[in-house]
Image (cartoon, rainbow, N blue to C red):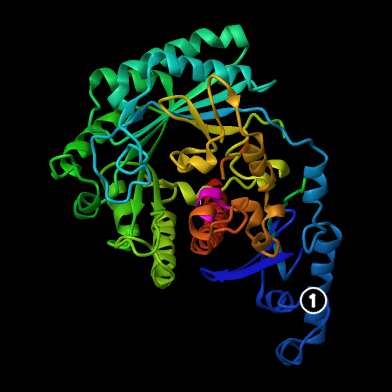
Amino acid sequence: MIHRYRYGGENIVIDVPSGSIHLVDDLAYRLLANDDYHLVTDEIRQDFSAEQIDQAIGELDELKESGLLHSVDQTKQIVDRFPKRSDIKAICLHVAHDCNLRCDYCFASSGDYQGSRELMSLETGQKALKFLCQHSGQRYQLEVDFFGGEPLMNWPVVKQLVAYGRQLEPIYHKKFRFTLTTNGLLLDDEIEDFLHREMSNVVLSIDGRKPTNDRVRKTLNNKSSYDIIVPKFQRFIKGRGDKQYYVRGTFTAHELAFSQDVEHLHQLGFKELSMEPVVAKPGEPYALTEEHLPRLLQEYERLAQTMLEAYNTDDEFRFFHFEIDLAGGPCAVKKAGGCGAGIEYLAITPSGELYPCHQFVGDEQFLLGDLDQGIIYPERRNRFNHLSVFDKPDCQNCWSKYYCSGGCHANAFNFNADLTVPYRLACELERKRVELAIYLAIKKMEVDRATQVS
Amino acid sequence: MKKHVKTVYIGKQEACGECQTCNQGC
């Protein structure tokens, strides 16, 4: 399988199984419209000489013989050689089912996940870290994401859990990678110093321009959160040094021009940016629908152009979905297997319940067990071991399957009531993002080469 | 020197489990 597309004056061809990428001229591009590019149409014969056509076909043959074009897909055979694993390597630790914001679109139902407002006790958190160590097999690097609600509402426990994790590392021969997601309202000097020291990544939530942000991200007394958090975030990244952070927003039907919100965040001084489409059922006033798609695709194009213009200058910034690591990307098992939710990744609630990921928390049909008894419903967990791209019918003929790995299971269930049927709108957005990410990777290589020459 | 095709990335088809979890590289 190949995918070919035209963008920014380039004819781009992707060999799906190998991930090889080629730039081709108009003749080769038109020949590749046919799976058997030896079948030359009359239109092509009218536009090009026999010598040109033979030469182009010869070059395509050479690529094919080298396994770089129309290569035979062996990914499934590679993946099947490895036994399905049950080791856990990452947990989303819900230290607070409470929040000091009331965001309209919150999938966590303003922080409580359709339950009672609750903070995780130190004892439960310690059990969770021990549970992770004891169920991670030979895996050395473990990840713990402090999440909520708003995790800073349970700050003393976060600090004590990090210290406890560091104590466990030599005992179990593990290394914890701690991360935290916050709305920033409670950031202060003491918290920031600790986050810089102990957190490998910090995700800072803000939706962009003040009207965009404040329309949906409201404080408890219905005031602007933008005015409070922007100075705090700016101070935070000044002290962050070269450690990882992301300023991350959500775009909704209320404001489709999300590229302007990303650019605004960039103008505020943030360099590591992410902007996600809201996940909401149709009928919600802020929900994205198919009719929004053309505009959203334009917004991604606009953002890609802005990024390209800023590349290799002092204004350079990164957008999460356009970061694609061609040379150092994931292995076949990771590409086909997806996010690992339910298997290597679990969410743990303040009371110690286990769910496949944070998106499923509160939905009792996905409860997997608890910290005291472990996995109580192995058949529920096992469903998630059969959600690779090979298990999703819609993915079979999709060129992007090894870049998106089958999409978000929670989206599939929320929109289609079936874990194996991806959410179509998300697929369309993802395909566009991958096309642009590959285009940007090509153009960045060109800039890098030109810079080296000069 | 090819005239019609320029390969910009040579991919290859071929589970240590140590990569990060929710484009990331290994």
> Is A439 placed left or right of A47 in the picture?
left
Q: Residues within 10 Å of mark 1 (few under 14, many from 20)?
A: some
In the image shown, does A124 or A155 lie closer to the viewer? A124
**Residue A329 shows in the view:** no
| Residue drawn where x is 37% and y is 19% of the image | A158
Q: Secondary structure at mark 1?
A: loop
| Residue drawn where x is 26% and y is 17% of the image | A190
In the image shown, does A427 or A6 lie closer to the viewer? A427
Rendered image quadrant of residue B1: bottom right
Could you tell me residue A335's position as x and y percent?
Answer: 66, 46
Rendered image quadrant of residue A240: top left
Could you tell me residue B26's position as x and y percent?
Answer: 63, 36
> Is A70 placed left or right of A244 in the picture?
right
| Residue drawn where x is 37% and y is 17% of the image | A121
> Is A46 placed left or right of A11 in the picture?
right
Vertical relation: A230 (above or below) A439: above
State which region is magenta: A407-412
| Residue drawn where x is 59% and y is 37% of the image | A342
In the image shown, does A149 or A11 lie closer to the viewer? A149
Vertical relation: A254 (above or below) A249: below
| Image label count | 1
Could you tell me residue A439's position as x and y percent?
Answer: 55, 60
Query: For mark 1, what is the residue?
Result: A37
Q: At label 1, which amino acid type do we have?
A: Tyr
Could you tell me residue A221's position as x and y percent?
Answer: 13, 41
Vertical relation: A30 (above or below) A419: below
Determine the main secondary structure of the stretch shown in magenta. helix
Q: Is residue A196 magenta?
A: no
